[in-house]
Amino acid sequence: MTRQHSPAGQLDRRQLLKLGAGLGAASFFSAANLQAKTIATRARIVILGGGAGGMAMANRLSQRLDGASITIVEPRERHHYQPGWTLVASGVWNPERTVRANTDFLPRRVDWTRTPAVGIDAEQHRVTLADASTLDYDILIVATGLQLNYHLIDGMSPELVGDHGIGSVYASLEAATRTRDAIDAWIAGGGGQGLFTTPPTAIKCAGAPIKMAFTTLSRIKAVERRDAFAMDYFTPSDGMFSQPWISDFLKQRFDREGITRHHGQHLSAIDPGARQAEFTLRDGSTEVRDFDFIHVVPPMSAPDFVKASDLIAKQGPFAGEWLDVDIHTLQHNRYPEVFGIGDVIGAPINKTGASVKAQAPVVEANLVAHLQDQPPSARHDGYTSCPLITDIGKAMLVEFGYDNDLAFLPSFSFIDPKEESWAAWVLKDYLLQPAYYAMLEGRI
């Protein structure tokens, strides 16, 4: 398909080269303590999960710790670059571009257990695997990612994605591909009703539902039949994004583009055959709407076996749903030998690949401090970023932290975080993936 680059936002060749060179120097990709001194230890370290957080920690610790026994628990053979799934679903990337073998990243000195974890005994420092075997640990890193709870939407399952006009970019690479096909079929039909949803829970890549609305709109505009397509967006909150200025921008942009906003509503049931969706309002009442296409975002939580363990938060906003860690040190609040990284942790934001990049050196430093009987000294400020696609060919590089404002200087001086630009699109389309893989290898 033809990409729609904004002439006003284009960079000249020198700026584009500067953007690429900036990968190694800009604060956006920098990392701390890469030359830190190794320490000798016989600690048994178990890492649950081989995604972005788990693989990054396996590489960092294999370089930092001399003599440690490190085991990573990961049943998948392939590593998925999940930030690319929205581009797959939007018809921009081929699916194969998002897949690499786990062996491409796994350090030789790390043991790889492919049997899934099913239980954690925090008191006994023990992990139980699906074949009933166990792993004892001195240090546990919980990097499991999160769980997609499609079953909490009555009538919905990930197997439905691609059929009956149902899309969902989150379920898998195959689902992202089928979502692309479902959008293709809707557009080829010449018109109809599209519904785009967000759930009443924290989600990974909170910008993805918005990106899917904007990229779908871009594809509709390309066939020059905008008036034939109705688009509605449903969110359980009063806002559109955690950062207030972005939320205001999105409200104005949706209104200008004719995407009808529905606040205080979430998808609670779906009838695939009838192509009807039920939405629950704040007062408990429900409304049923017809659709020709619907993008479903499921409720999310920590995996069930983490929720069933003593490591889950017992009180506060993350109780019963997310790993109980100090949001700054990333050390467990009740079990100091346990650390969390990535989507599984209970934090007000932080479920992106950029969050993992910022968290990894903090976990490394505080884990090493714990092994040396020292208090944690490194602190995570909540840094995260979202290359928010607003059109195929344009994006905004949104960066923020726990303070939820523009507390961070722009990583690239020539990308205005409050303006849509082709430069931010180039960052998303071409440059972030190599940086992500460097993060997995412990190089940034």
Image (cartoon, rainbow, N blue to C red):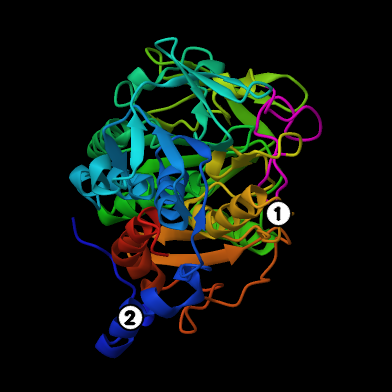
Q: Badge 2: few (under 14), some or many (20 or more) residues near its Cα, within 10 Å? A: few
Residue drawn where x is 69% and y is 47% of the image: 348
Is residue 355 toward the left or the right of residue 95 in the image?
right
- How many tags in the picture? 2
Tell me the quadrant of the picture where the N terminus can be found: bottom left
Q: Find out whether residue 331 is within the magenta segment.
A: yes
- Residue under numbered circle 2: 21
In magenta, the rendered stretch is 310-332
User: Above or below — where is 90 with respect to 386?
Assistant: above
Is residue 59 toward the left or the right of residue 335 in the image?
left
Residue drawn where x is 46% and y is 51% of the image: 61
Label 2 element class: helix
Comparing 141 with 345, the one in front is 141
Comparing 253 with 331, the one in front is 331
Q: Earlier in the sequence, mark 2 or mark 1?
A: 2
- Residue under numbered circle 1: 328
Residue drawn where x is 68% and y is 60% of the image: 379
Disc 2 versus disc 1: distance between alpha carbons? 31 Å
Label 1 element class: loop
